Amino acid sequence: MNWTLEVVPVPVTDMDRAKEFYADKAGFKVDLDDEVAPGMRIIQMTPPGSRCSIVMLQGMPEAPGMKSMAPGTLQGLQLCVTDIEAAREELVGRGVEVSPVRHVGATGWEDGKGETWNSFMSFEDPDGNGWVVQEAPAELSER
């Protein structure tokens, strides 16, 4: 049986501001923006080429046994791209503050690209939720 990660909740303070950031600046596709019941809104968005989406919820009760995450506490979600420099240029061109491309070297994090699987950059959404982008040697379907 396959266990596929398909939706990750992202805690935000302002749904419209987050939707604008992820759609217009990060380039995610808006899959759903719906009020499922009075005062309960769901926005689901998917990064280009991904099978996993993010979801932002407003007014929804927590799922049984789950704890609430404060906006800005989600850190380290990782996206993969095949050309990190082009991806960085695209994000910067859309107005996203992105770290320089870095790699792990002998002394820790060092500026510039590294070898295969060792090139990274990072950015945050307006609430401070942190994302990492890693360069992969090929598309997922080819690995």
Image (cartoon, rainbow, N blue to C red):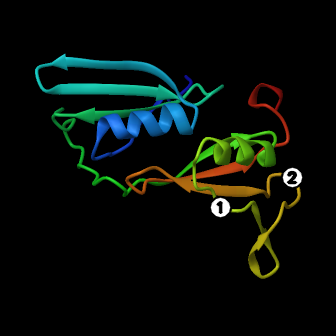
Q: Is residue 16 left or right of residue 80?
A: left
> Residue 143 at what x, y percent from top left?
81, 33
Quarter of the picture holding the N terminus: top right
Q: Which residue is mark 1?
A: 99
- Kindly identify the amino acid type of the residue bearing the numbered disc 1: Ser
Q: Is residue 19 left or right of residue 60?
A: right
Q: Earlier in the sequence, mark 2 or mark 1?
A: 1
Question: Disc 2 versus disc 1: distance between alpha carbons?
Answer: 19 Å
- Kindly identify the amino acid type of the residue bearing the numbered disc 2: Thr
Give the structural element (helix, strand or loop) at label 1.
loop
Q: Which residue is mark 2?
A: 116
* Extreme-bottom residue of the structure: 107
Q: Is residue 92 left or right of residue 103?
A: left
> Residue 133 at what x, y percent from top left?
66, 49
Few, some or many residues within 10 Å of mark 2 (<14, 14–19, 20+): few
Give the structural element (helix, strand or loop) at label 2.
loop
Position above or below: 67 against 115:
above
